Image (spheres, helix red, strand yellow):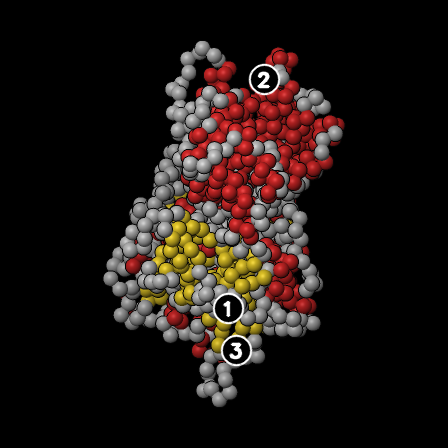
Amino acid sequence: MAAAFVVGIDLGTTHTVVASAPLGAGGERGGEAGAITLFGIDQWVAPGELGRPALLPSVRYHPAPGELPESALPWGERAAGDTTEPPALIGVLARQRGGEVPGRLVASAKSWLSHPQADRLAPILPWGADDSVSRVSPVTASASYLAQVRAAWNRHHPDTPLERQRLVLTLPASFDEAARALTLQAAREAGLPEPQLLEEPQAAFGDWVWRHRDRLAEALDGVRRVLVCDVGGGTSDFTLIDVEPPEAGAPAGTPPTLRRRAVGQHLMLGGDNMDLALAHLVERRLAGGGVAPPLSGARLSQLVARCRVAKEMLLADDAPDSVAVTLLGGGSKLVGGARSVTLGREEVRALLVDGFFPAVPFEAEPQRARTALVEFGLPYASDAAVTRHLAAFLRRSLLPGEALPDAVLLNGGVFRAGQLAARLVEVLAAWRGGAAPRLLHNADPDVAVARGAVAHALARQGRGPRIGGGAARTVVLRLDDGRAVCLLPRGTDAGRALVLEGRTFRLRLGQPVRFQLASLRGEAGPPPEPGALLDLGEAGDEALNPLPPVATVIEAGDGVGARGASVTVRLEAQLSEIGVLALQAVAVDDPGRRWALDFQLRASGPADQVQPAQALQDAQIAPRLPEAIAAIERLFGARSGGERPAPKEIKQLRQTLETLLGPRESWARPLARRLFDVLWQRAKGRRRSADHERVWLNLAGWCLRPGFGDPLDGWRLGQLWTIFEAGVEHRSDAQVAIQWWTLWRRVAGGLDEAAQLRLLDDFGYNLQAAEHPGAPLPPRPSGLVKGGHDDMVRLGAALERIPPEHKAEVGDWLLAPLQGEKVAKASPERDELRLWALGRLGARQPFHGSVHGVVPSEVAARWIDALLALDWRRRRMAAFAAAQLARLTGDRVRDLDPDRRAQVLERLAASGAAPSWARMVSEVVQLDAADEQALFGESLPPGLVLVG
């Protein structure tokens, strides 16, 4: 079936909007070709009342059983993976119910798609909901909004189903390739195959261009550069578009040439932040000037929903003088416990104008300090001033002496407030020496993006002016020496394939290969050529936006060669027609053989925060590395008829390697991973003796710690895990058993939840066997290696990906000997170890796990109470554990109440604890090297930075 419509879908943080146009006069209903209209989306607008507003609030309400029997629309299928029961309510009534009942509303799912420290494919929303509320992943939540759109469209267009139409789906210009891929995955889960992706600011400008298409040259007369400032619910997006007038002598009415010049960095700053600012204001007033405990995360979410409604009312043209914000009570006090605060129109407008659009000089830099506007697990921008971020964007995007934009298009619901729009134009005028830019009228900022998506598709058919621009950013391959290779220059048109001539890679068959990619920040001037080698200079990582690694496995066969052989390839990059980056490895000797490189979206650790290892010659990694490899080969390689190594040589291998390579604490990650690869290739040699096995386990764990950080670590961990079930060869040797568990503790950060749960089985069995000798035990795990108390405690502390309820059980076990009558019988050394493990297990900011996996704040509070009963001068690790449990993250769901944190701060000061421990309880800070070592239990490889 040929498409009859082009359909634009604005999957917004706050609302989802759909627009469409017939593709021809013969389209459905005989509509005029190119006439863009809005589509009313069926949704519950009140209990039992269906409506078709043009805006579908992008929220889900998860009702309790029997709460809303009509919560599911009576048509269409739900998105794949959306199995919540009862079915979720989506749209106007969902938003209303979320403002009445705390803890059941999923909002800002789109913002979660770009959150790198969360597992965006895991069921984590509603954030902070209790166990009685079903959860969905950010991808599934996004898919559910699209599924509702699809169901509504197909109900009204049964002969032209949405999945058969020409679809354009918009997203922030700042979305990286991972967020774009996740958006496409959400579309697929909703039954919408491969829509074209379009950036929201370009779509908004496209709508303006479409509306002025018949007199575009006149409308842009004298304009040479347009700034599109799109402040939506979740993000602020900036785009520069250059305007080139028609050549002299061109026919009258010839439109100017439009080409996107630059796009801004990802900036999680928008209407949600404004709602939060108002909610914090209301919360303070609800306390009546007293010291009231802060609202829970669920109650704050309810208050934010109420403040969003108040904001929209007070920013409207016909706004009342004031609006009462009412926070309902809970349980039996739903009405009787309600409290209200009045917000005045002028105070709200002043707060939002001065707080989010302050008058700043053009040289202003965004502030880096984290603010209180960090809630619901989302890493909002550290500086709420849109104008400071805009100044930085313009400085990065323009060459010295280039003119600032002389026209501006404002998009997003916040600009319905005339004061906000006027302030931004005022700031731009000050930067331009007093000359205000031309303000391009945006007829309806709530729907401009959806309309512009349709206009974009029509323009590609030659029915209107096109906006060129191609790839939004230059994509590069990161090297380990401070340089990068250009893969796809900014501005590359869709469909154009670029092969990196002159740069080849040798890939081994049957083994995965990964490449670490990034995009350039703040590009001004012409983009680099494909294959160009870029020296990042002093900026280093600051010049790059990291992207997830891309990977493939080239299997033997099909004329490629035998397993273990290699093939030489070049990389080919292309911006696909649907707007996503496509990469392939192409065989040099036969370009017809090619392998797709796919983005790895579910990372095993925060690899996007660190530098990747790059394939270098051994001598380039370390001058004496070839000698070190020879030493390992002599002990663990294939045996020949020559002299056998003496036992002393085996035991002294670490000393030998340190003599050749320096102290092992100084081994950088590329060196450590190369040594692990050498050890793994000779893994069978560890079985030769207990000394061989002990040394191999010790070195392998050290070189692969902490299990993430290099693009190939996921594959390395997968290979290493294959030896777990078999256990060790020399089971009677106690030192071998110790090194076995040390290995798994060191690399646990790269293991997924299933593997960590398997380690938990051995943890539990070993401890039960030690604490209850002779008692009945559960079935013995296969290949079990015995582990003592201390080894198991260290291992348990590293299992950050096990479910929170298991962590709570382990933490209670760790605390038990330190409470009541058992305290006098405890071992001081063992106490310190247990307290360290408790701090690691209950940390508010995990080392390698997802933020949704931390133990509940009420469990951490209970542990804090137990720690406060101890003498911290005698048990120094009690202070460390308390600091980790009370650490401030800015996320109200994870953070403890202020009273407990105040108690911890008082005790930290009295016990003489490190000042950095107190700082992490009172401020949102990044750990220093000493605290990283204290948390991990030993040093990290140089260059690996623990973020958060």
Relative to the observer, which residue lies in front, 12 or 419?
12
Task: Say how many tags the image has.
Answer: 3
Instruction: Give the distance between the C-alpha atoms of the residues marked 3 and 2, in whole angstroms.
Output: 76 Å
Helix, strand or loop at mark 2: helix
Q: Residue at x 42, y 16 (%)?
A: 777
Q: Which mark is residue 244?
A: 3
The amino acid pointed to by label 3 is Glu
Seen from the viewer's position, the closer of residues 585 and 391 is 585
The alpha-carbon separation of the residues under discs 2 and 1 comes to: 65 Å
Question: What is the x, y in percent for residue 173?
Answer: 50, 60
Q: CA distance from mark 3 to mark 1?
A: 23 Å
* Residue 529: mark: 1
Q: Do we see residue 554 in this rendering?
A: yes
Task: Mark 3 vs mark 2: give the one in front.
Answer: 2
Query: Which of pointers 3 and 1 indicates the residue nearer the eye?
Result: 1
Which disc number belongs to residue 817? 2
SS for dot 1: loop
Image quadrant assignment for residue 938:
top right
Marks 2, 1: nearer the viewer: 1
- Disc 3 secondary structure class: strand
Q: Is residue 274 left or right of residue 733?
A: right
The three-letter code of the residue at mark 2 reads Pro
Is residue 727 depicted above or below 222 in this figure? above
